[in-house]
Amino acid sequence: MKKLIALVGLLILWACEEPIDLPLPAHDKRVVIDAMLWRPVGEAVGSLEVVLSTTTNFYNSSITYLEGATVTLQSQELIFTTQEAEKGRYLAKNIPVAIDEEFTLTVTIDGKTYSASETLVLSTPIDSIKQGNQTLISGNETEAIVKFTDRPEEGNYYVMDFGYNNLFVTRDEFYNNQQLTFSFFYDEYFPKNTPSPIHLMGADKSFYTYMQILISHAGQDGGGPFATAKSLLQGNIQNNTNPDDFPLGYFRVVERDTFVFTATEN
């Protein structure tokens, strides 16, 4: 009996050391369009940033970016054409961004055309971000204490980008027209003594809900919520050539404020 127990123990140890790749259903390869037209809070001119890629399977961490696309933005009679600044990343600057004006994004690639239309969502400045001393489970997290004051009207939604694929969403249900203070915790790998921009942007209810679902699906797993999407969550972008072959990603038009946060060793 002792020999049998020892043999079973060896088999368990051997099995634990062997990598196991579970077979997963083949995924449909889809275009991913991460598009944002943004202006700084209170200003009148902004920039368009569009990243084009394709979905990947669960075990593939690399990103396939899409080159050679035609990406334009139309507002009333004006049409802005982007330049491919680097592989899969398309930019256009000095775009007038007015309240209540509709903007239509059009992406053409591989004989297919995708489009979406949105209007500007206002935001608010970040009051302050300071480093705190609290930690969570590991004891090695970095606490960022964030303060911002909600806009006076009811029903505001916000998305915060803390960098390094860390995203946070909130709404003013319990702090309308008041200052919100909360702590965000970076993991132990967050770099110290390195200036890190943190962005606060306005969101409408649709984009807020989309981001809530997307964050819960993707987690903060280092791939970015759009670039390595592993679930078919449809955003607001349509495939005009073949509506059934919809892309992933979202086009938003927002005000955005930026605060540069530098953490130090405690």
Image: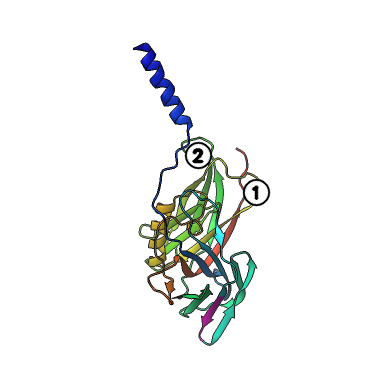
Percent across and percent down for residue 198 are 56, 56
| Image point (57%, 61%), residue name | 258
- Disc 1 designates what residue? 194
Q: CA distance from mark 2 to mark 1?
A: 20 Å
What range of the chain is rendered magenta? 71-76
Q: Could you tell whether 161 is left or right of 246 in the image?
A: right
- Residue 78 appears at what percent x and percent y? 56, 85
Q: Is residue 50 above or below residue 73?
A: above
Q: Is residue 37 magenta?
A: no
Q: Tell me the amino acid under the disc marked 1.
A: Thr
- Tag 2: Cα neighbours inside 10 Å, few (<14), some, or many (≥20)? some
Q: Is residue 72 magenta?
A: yes
Residue nearest the observer in this picture, 195 or 229:
229
In the image, residue 25 above or below residue 5:
below
Comparing 117 with 56, the one in front is 56
Residue 13 visible to the viewer: yes
**Is residue 205 left or right of 227 when viewed as pictured?**
left
Task: Please name the residue that numbered disc 2 is placed on.
Answer: 134
Q: Position of residue 6 (x, y in %)?
A: 40, 16
In primary-sequence order, the first of circles 2 and 1 is: 2
Is 105 situated above or below 188?
below
Q: SS of the residue at dot 2? A: loop
Main secondary structure of the magenta stretch: strand
Which quadrant is the N terminus positioned in?
A: top left
The amino acid at mark 2 is Gln
Residue placed most toward the observer, 219 or 115:
115
- Specify how the rendered protein is coloured: rainbow
Q: Secondary structure at mark 1?
A: loop
